[in-house]
Amino acid sequence: EPEVTQTPSHQVTQMGQEVILRCVPISNHLYFYWYRQILGQKVEFLVSFYNNEISEKSEIFDDQFSVERPDGSNFTLKIRSTKLEDSAMYFCASSPLETATYQPQHFGDGTRLSIL
Amino acid sequence: ELKVEQNPLFLSMQEGKNYTIYCNYSTTSDRLYWYRQDPGKSLESLFVLLSNGAVKQEGRLMASLDTKARLSTLHITAAVHDLSATYFCAVGHQFYFGTGTSLTVIP
């Protein structure tokens, strides 16, 4: 069964550095999402992406964050000037159509980001 | 910001019993999602609910939506150990998540 894959599984970065989290969505999917989950806390939506542009974003997704689909297969989340509070598990998801049309999202296993 | 509350936060129930998890949200929304998360694992989509009175069922789980009351329920029928997980609801285009309900089913 096709899967959403995320790399790396664990990223350790010095505070202030830039980090890129990578995701390969399922190949025929059109909608892509990033979420984060701080350890022991609830899941937080960051951004959704369709047709090469952001379709929705949360208040968390400020100028520090950006997303890109550079080559038609990868979907990346860039975090600039990382802060300690950016430490979290970041999940990527994809769906064949927008979720309101009853299409479930498929999630990757996540990237654990640790900021030192 | 839309606020989403789930209760209970923690639920311990015996196998074979029925129980309901509640998800309340603060402002009108046209969509509500339910997810499951096993400890240390990723999320799994369970249901999408789009209209008042919508009901979805999958196995021992049934979700419903009352948009007028701004309330969704996730009903568990005849619980089994495999249902032990954390269940999240999320509301709206921006996926405002509830705090989650940690369910433990005891043999």
Image: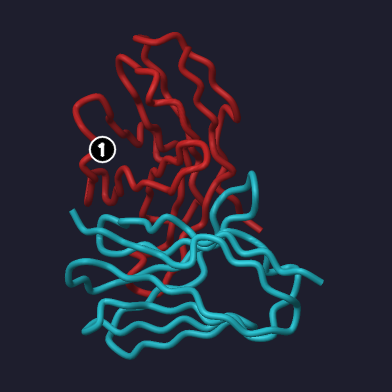
Chain colours: A red, B cyan
Quadrant of res A59: top left
Q: Amino acid at mark 1?
A: Ile
Q: Residues within 10 Å of mark 1 (few under 14, many from 20)?
A: few
Q: Estimate the x, y position of residue A48 in percent, counting from the top left.
A: 30, 49
Lateral position of residue B83 relative to residue B101, left or right: right
- Work out whether residue B52 or residue A92 is closer to the camera in this orientation and state it: B52
**Residue at left offset 37%, top offset 77%:** B72
The numbered mark 1 sits on a residue in which chain? A
Image height check: is B34 above or below A8? below
Q: Looking at this rendering, what residue extends furthest in the right direction?
A: B107
Q: Nearer the viewer, residue A40 or A17?
A: A40
Is A6 above or below relative to B77?
Answer: above
Instruction: Count the marks.
Output: 1
Q: Nearer the viewer, residue B23 or B62?
A: B23
**Residue that numbered label 1 is attached to:** A60
Residue, x 46% and y 44% (percent of image)?
A: A41
Q: Quadrant of the C terminus of chain B?
A: bottom right
Which of these two is toward me, A73 or B91?
Answer: B91
Q: Position of B47 compared to A98: left or right?
A: right
Residue at x 27% of width, y 87% of height: B52
**Mark 1 residue element:** loop
Check the image and name the residue furthest to the bottom.
Answer: B53
Residue A37, quarter of picture: top left
Residue B73, given in percent of the width and then of the height, sits at 43, 79
Name the residue: 73% across, 68% down.
B82
Rendering coords of residue B58 (x, y %): 58, 81
Q: Quadrant of residue B37?
A: bottom right
